[in-house]
Image (cartoon, grey):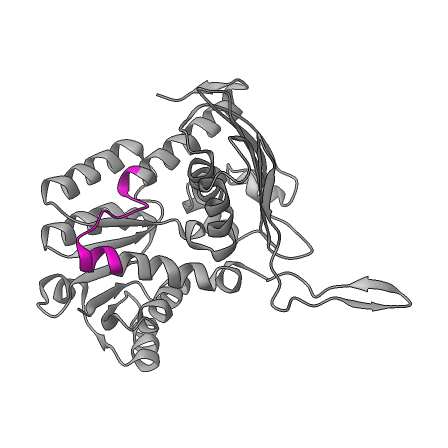
Amino acid sequence: MTVRFGLLGAGRIGKVHAKAVSGDANAKLVAVADAFPAAAEAISAAYGCEVRTIEAIEAAKDIDAVVICTPTDTHADLIERFSRAGKAVFCEKPIDLDAARVKACIKVVEETKGKLMVGFNRRFDPHFMAVKKAIDEGRIGTVEMVTITSRDPGAPPVDYIKRSGGIFRDMTIHDFDMARFLLGEEPVAVTATAAVLVDKAIGEAGDYDSVSVILQTASGKQAIISNSRRATYGYDQRIEIHGSKGLVSAENQRPFSIELANGEGYTRPPLHDFFMTRYTEAYANEIASFIAAVEKGAPITPSGADGLAALKLADAALQSVKEGRLVKID
């Protein structure tokens, strides 16, 4: 079976998913829709798909699934529309910035017996998957502490910051999902601190650019997350899991894994410059996982419930910062 796709949104992340869908032998990109015709036409020219309206894709008989890459405030409405239309849905995170709206959206998906996958691509990174495999095989014993470092090369424009939902819902949400994925238990308490150290305009917009978070589970396991909107040395993405019998970690990745040694010392190439190159394989793997689940009628993960759980952690972290205390998770 070839899963036939419609792409909603032809911006930066839309281009990433267009490439992933078109590169999968079990998928076909049939159509693309975007509010900006030039953006949709660029995808059409690159991958040979049609430019259609969202309404046409919704009604189309030749489309089985959609990838939602539109602005965040449209995600929940589109998930509901396409679930009711009988199409499988892959949606970029978050489903919405409001937990109550996310719950209502998930209820519609359940009522329509829809299929929904939320785009937490880091679960599908080959290096992080190898770490998870080592954990599942018991090679480090029982997980005790997870350390996640995630720092962007530079801050996004302030206009983006204003509509992003804030650093916890926009950036740290990926790390909240990864922490849940690696801990194997749900966090029950959150402590967070935050500051504006990179760009005062971010603070003026009501957000932070430098945050630290500690998650705790009922059994006492901990996850420590470090985020910054600035890393002068490249896209900093590292994880380390300490267990009762040892440790497993994934280091930063580079476009070329070489090391040069001479009289001046040892040097290596710089890190990837952002997520589009660092997580290329992860995006391909997550789309492949979605396609396989649609084909086989298998459970889809990360699910809408995973999206909601990560958002609740983001909300709790923001509350912790504002109130200066540990916040327990409902």
The residue closer to the viewer here, 278 or 74, is 278
How many numbered discs?
Answer: 0
Region rendered in magenta: 292-305
Give the left or right position of residue 248, taking residue 1 as reference. Answer: right
Q: Give the percent coordinates (x, y) of residue 154.
A: 60, 54
Q: Outermost residue, right direction?
A: 263
Q: Give the percent coordinates (x, y) of residue 328.
A: 43, 19
The residue closer to the viewer here, 43 or 297, is 297
Q: Give the percent coordinates (x, y) of residue 161.
A: 48, 47
Q: Is residue 219 magenta?
A: no
Give the left or right position of residue 149, taking residue 176 as reference. Answer: right
User: Which residue corresponds to the image point at 34% horizontal and 69% vertical from the top-left?
Assistant: 18
Give the left or right position of residue 147, taking residue 26 as reference. Answer: right
Answer above or below: position of 159 versus 28. above
Q: Quadrant of the N terminus?
A: bottom left
User: Which residue corresponds to the image point at 16% horizontal and 37% vertical from the top-left?
Assistant: 107
Q: Is residue 69 visible?
A: no
Q: Give the percent coordinates (x, y) of residue 140.
A: 55, 37
Answer above or below: position of 308 versus 171. above
Q: Quadrant of the C terminus?
A: top left
Answer above or below: position of 81 versus 185. below
Answer above or below: position of 241 versus 1. above
Q: Is residue 295 magenta?
A: yes
Q: Is residue 61 visible?
A: yes
User: Which residue corresponds to the image point at 20% horizontal and 57% vertical from the top-left?
Assistant: 294
